[in-house]
Amino acid sequence: AINDMGSGRLMGFIDNVAPAAADLKPEQTVAGEELKREKGAPTALFVFKTVYQPNLGQITFFKVKAGEVKLNDKLVNSRNDETEILNQLFIMDGKERKPISQLTVGDIGATLKLKYTKTNDTLHEAGHPVAIKPIKYPASRIRKAVYAENKNDEEKLSDALRKIRSQDPTVVVKYSKEAKQLILGCQGELHLATIKWTLKNIYGVDVRFEKPKISFRETIQKASNASYRHKKQSGGSGQFGEVHMKIEPWHEGMEDPDGFNIRGKEEVDLPWGGKLMFYNCIVGGVIDVRYLPSIMKGVLEVMESGPLTGSYIRDVRVMVYDGKMHSVDSNDISFKIAGAHAFKEAFLNANPKLLEPTQELTVKVPEEMVGNVMTDLQSRRSMIQGIDSLNNYQILKCITPEAELYGYSTDLRSLTQGRATFNSSFASYQPVPANVQKELIQQE
């Protein structure tokens, strides 16, 4: 551009090939309505980029989609209904900011230090609510666990990643309570290297990346009975509670259990997926009904950390059908402990099975390279679901365990000289092969 090399050809291409502004399709709102691109229409801005600079703070880039915006205008964020005041308006010319008092429909501008606004938000005139369709960003292709080299920088790291995420929505940051790891998702190795450089040179945080832990699930494959008596005496009133229960695998649409006098049923949607079906089958008042929530609480505590690998347990139904209590010593904590121990024993006797998350993987690969890619997928325990053709490419669709996709982005690029692409999304939890389950349990 400095030497005017190619500028004319580029401008000629835009003039001859690119559509005119008048030919643009109407802007679509989230509600499915068309937004009028008119100067006299109510003001609507779309935020398409956010940047943080050490000496300035947050710079918000936007396009005026309708109406006009003036200095010190008050606009409402459609996502959170917060009011923002545009105290400064700029047109950006590279790094240079040119102050301006007014922008009209079609203009691109910037402002500073908005408190409640981030990328993909819509700012609209008060009394004229509108939400413009957000940009859809690609899903992460690689995932890493990220740690601060200095433990004292952990809070600083979280704040820096939050700012990077607000500037680049293709960066995904979340904390896995189950794995106790901060997980970073991005588009590839170069993207990851850029993030690491930014953390070190812009925010002053040295980090390291590790392989993220896989979020397994535990369940059972057959029915099992167990009982447990909790008894503790230490002067004065003690603790006593005895629980008898049966557990079974559960699936959607399953009939209520036979052979029990069902007095009550509770269906619990587990936060980590799946369900717990809890049945009160007590006959004759051998356990007071007020202790049943404590028994269920004990069961849920075990389900939060399964006996096999410490993973969450899902899709089990529990029938509490007998037990004993003491008029003085029985209390909530006694039945909670008894319920937890009885459930754990029953679980280990019910042929427990480890489940692993699988991904629906789609790979677009040149025809001449399909063989190598197929061989690699099969080595990753993939189940091929289908193959489609598109021009000179083959589209491979398969189900692959998430544990086998670590490093796949780099390996696929090496196999195909960077000519193949892929995307993936969560499919379901599937049983782990027996040999893999044995190895995982031994590692715990």
Image (tube, rainbow, N blue to C red):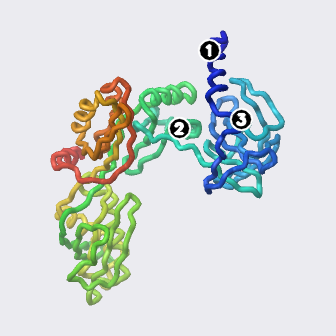
Q: Earlier in the sequence, mark 2 or mark 3?
A: 3
Residue 351 located left or right of residue 97: left
Q: Which mark is residue 161?
A: 2
> Which residue is drawn at the image coordinates 34% and 78% (left, top)?
265
- Position of residue 46 measured from the top left corner of the image (x, y, whole percent): 67, 43
Tell me if mark 1 has few (under 14), some (14-19) or many (20+) residues whose alpha carbon lies within 10 angstroms of its own: few
- Position of residue 253 measured from the top left corner of the image (x, y, whole percent): 31, 71
- Most extreme residue toward the bottom, as rendered? 284
Tell me if mark 3 has few (under 14), some (14-19) or many (20+) residues whose alpha carbon lies within 10 angstroms of its own: some
Amino acid found under the numbered disc labelled 2: Leu
- Position of residue 142 measured from the top left corner of the image (x, y, whole percent): 40, 36
- For the residue labelled by badge 2, is the local secondary structure a helix, a strand or a loop? helix
Q: Which mark is residue 6?
A: 1
Taking depth in this image into account, of 259 and 179 the one nearest to the observer is: 259
Separation (CA) of disc 1 from disc 2: 38 Å
- Position of residue 291 measured from the top left corner of the image (x, y, whole percent): 35, 78
Residue 260 located left or right of residue 166: left
> Which residue is drawn at the image coordinates 22% and 38% (left, top)?
378
* Disc 2 versus disc 3: nearer the observer: 3
Q: Is residue 148 above or below residue 259?
A: above
Q: Which residue is mark 3?
A: 108
Tell me if mark 2 has few (under 14), some (14-19) or many (20+) residues whose alpha carbon lies within 10 angstroms of its own: many
Snapshot quadrant of residue 71? top right
* Disc 1 versus disc 2: nearer the observer: 1
Separation (CA) of disc 2 from disc 3: 27 Å
